[in-house]
Amino acid sequence: MLRGQVQAQQRRAASKATGAVAGDVCVRRAVSGARASQPLAAAAPSRATAAPRRRALRAAAAAVAAERAVVGPNPYAQPAGKGLGFYTGEDGFLYCDNMRVDDIRAQVKDSPFYLYSRDRITANYRAYQKALEGLDSIIGYAVKANNNLKIVQHLQGLGSGAVLVSGNELKLAIAAGFDPSRTILNGNGKLPWELELAASAGCLVNVDSEFDFDNIAAAARKVGKKVKVLLRINPDVDPQVHAYVSTGLASSKFGIRNSHLQWFLDAIKAEPMVELVGVHSHLGSTITKVNIFRDAAVIMCDFIKKINDEGFKLTYLNIGGGLGIDYTHNPSTKLPSPTDLIDTVRDIVKGLGLTLVIEPGRSMVATSCALVNTVTGVKTNGSKQFIVVDGSMAALIRPSLYDAYQHIELTAPCGGPKAVFDIVGPVCESADFLGKERELATPEPGAGLVVHDAGAYCMAMASTYNLKMRPAEYWVADNKLATIRRGETLDDHLRLFEGL
């Protein structure tokens, strides 16, 4: 059937449904061809009108499905309610595990909100677990990616360790029940109280600089406990990622260079409260070429040999994290898996007889989550069209901060005319956007719109700019929706000033 014939069928189906769908604001544009006159918060439909509305919704969804059949199958489509994580069901609706996102929107009071699939987090962890079979290893979840206590506790229950970059993250890890011997405190500017806490807890600590070593030694002496440390090596390997997330170049603020190695070895020999147990490197984030991990590991082998020749016996090789994900949702994109990453260094680690430490963050949690927004309206300035939503750079700053791309789609079938939009929020900044130049069907006010892959470095970087309060977080677990973090309120903000 020709595309024009399909579109004609869609128009005929839509015309029969005109004015009948109040429950689906996006389909309302498809069935009326113009802005609906009924407000979103209309009274609940009567029994007499509910059935026609349901029939109209099904007709519009079928019309959209017919158009997709002409264009080609959606590579992400799965049987409705049977998939894992976020996917478009065969009915054209967006799902999170077994639940329609629109059904979840109907349950949740406030918008925007973060929505997670707990099973997707589990699957991501299991992928690393399987990749590491046959190796002594520690999977150290990078808590900075997402510090939600429920998520951190879930990963701890699966057997994960934790990588921490602040004293408060260490306190969170202790509260979540992590084994301190499987936690690592990292960072180039660790504070004395943070190091004292790490020493008291028995946490591994990465040494980043001469002054950092001095502070670690002082903390160990103060609390009376020997600290096991790894030297963070700067291997000067280019991960070919955004400059803000590149951490392994010589110009980076992180790590030590070969010319400084002897100073650290001499200092550690002279300090009885510090024990050198390993080396560490971290190349960056959103890495898509795993061969660079091997390049770094080969460089690290040279360091390990030099260190062992000085009389040390190292236990750990920490290659950091940084494995990228498919933010574009392009079916032709082939990104490396955890197994691909580990296989690049497997023989090196086994040959040295070391415990391999990895620090996944983004690849552990990003794909488990979407920021769910509600469309406020559509506007044009003559040269550009905008979809305005209630989410903003305050809730999700990656696009504004890094010019990062995150896939955006509507939560329900929509027959509105397709156009190219910038998706923007209500914050008083021209930089407040969630996506630029995205082709979408034109939605009605009240339609659902999601920003995908929002589980890492999104809620963790959220702010209250413009007093847009940080949103609530939910997950689907055991086929049910559960709150895993309450949304912040203005009262929470005002409490900070009580009694002053």
Image (cartoon, rainbow, N blue to C red):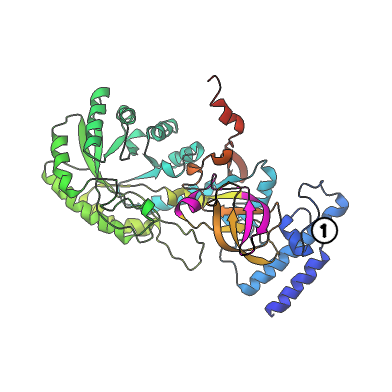
Residue 30 x/y as whole percent = 74, 64
Say what amino acid the circle numbered 1 marks.
Ala
Magenta highlight on residue 395: yes
Q: Which residue is mark 1?
A: 20
Q: Is 147 situated left or right of 418 in this image?
A: left
For the point 40% across and 44% down, the residue is: 141
Q: Quadrant of residue 81?
A: bottom right
- Residue 85 showing in the rendered view: no
Q: Residue furthest right?
A: 48
Residue 109 vs residue 424: left or right?
Answer: right
The quarter in which the N terminus is drawn is: bottom right
Count of marks, rendered view: 1
Instruction: Note whether 341 is above or below 356 in the view shown.
Output: below
| Residue 104 percent across, percent down from the top left | 66, 47
- Between 374 and 315, the one nearer to me in the picture: 374
Where on the picture, by quarter, is residue 225? top left
Q: Position of residue 490 (x, y in %)?
A: 60, 32
Residue span colored magenta:
373-402
Most extreme residue toward the front is 382
The single residue placed furthest to the bottom in the displayed view is: 2
Instruction: Pick whichever, 283 or 423, lies toward us.
Output: 423
Residue 55 in sight in this render:
yes
Relative to residue 426, is residue 53 depicted above or below? below
Left or right: residue 475 compared with residue 11: left
- Left or right: where 157 falls relative to 87: left
Residue 397 forms part of the magenta stretch: yes
Which residue: 56% across, 63% down? 437
List x then y, in percent, for residue 428.
58, 46
Crowding around mark 1 (Cα neighbors within 10 Å: few <14, some 14 to 19, many 20+) is many
Outermost residue toward the top? 499
Kindly state the secondary structure of the residue where label 1 is placed: loop
